[in-house]
Amino acid sequence: MSIEQHIEDIITSALLDKGFGVVRVQLQGSKRKTLQIMIERLDETNITVDDCADVTHIASALLDVNDPIHESYTLEVSSPGMDRPLVKLSDFERFSGSAIKVELKTPYEGSRRFQGILQGIEKNLVKVKLIPTEKDGKFNIAEFAFSDIQKAKLIPDYKA
């Protein structure tokens, strides 16, 4: 189990009780570590600064007791923003119909980066209606194994 998964396991229950879900936990940096906890409200309203402060206090207390990181670090709590990362398999179902960017661990048909409209999931396959290329001009449906996705995020619709 990764340190990020361990931290998520420590904080998830308490945050759910307060109406928050964990989007992503990331530990970054080598000399000066930063622990980033990205949250969302379960009622799907926007995250406020007060929400981030509340979650900071809850997470700090839990992490002080459990001590999963044995060196100094900075705790950063934030909202996912408009270009929300898609991290869990359930995210790919929830945001079906949204425009996304996907980066794969290994190439698919000669490329690792794709953009398109998320069509949801089927078993462990993420389906994306790809934006047509200049070569063929067709809307192709690509199926990526969830385990092959390095990172994915929503493409914000600033007009909406």
Image (spheres, rainbow, N blue to C red):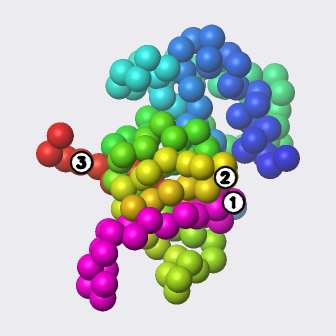
Residue position marked by numbered label 3 in the rendering: 157
Residue 138 forms part of the magenta stretch: yes
SS for callout 3: loop
Q: Which mark is residue 147?
A: 1
The amino acid marked with disc number 2 is: Asn
The amino acid marked with disc number 3 is: Asp
Say whether disc 2 or disc 3 marks the residue closer to the N-terminus. 2
On the rendered image, what quadrant is the C terminus found in? top left
Q: Residue at x 31, y 75 (%)?
A: 138
Q: Residue at x 76, y 31 (%)?
A: 9
SS for callout 2: loop
Q: Give the spatial CA distance, label 2 vs label 1.
A: 8 Å
Viewer-proximal residue among 144 and 60: 144
* Residue 16 against residue 116 in the figure, above or below: above
Image position, residue 62 (x, y; %) = 74, 22
Image position, residue 114 (x, y; %) = 43, 70
Which range is magenta?
Answer: 130-150
The amino acid marked with disc number 1 is: Ser
SS for callout 1: helix
Image position, residue 89 (x, y; %) = 61, 45
Viewer-proximal residue among 29 and 123: 123
* Residue 117 against residue 134 in the figure, above or below: above
Q: Is residue 141 left or right of residue 98?
A: right
Q: Are marks 2 and 1 in contact (CB under 8 Å)?
A: yes
Q: Is residue 57 left or right of residue 159?
A: right
Q: Residue at x 68, y 25 (%)?
A: 12
Q: Residue at x 35, y 47 (%)?
A: 98
Foreground label between 2 and 1? 2
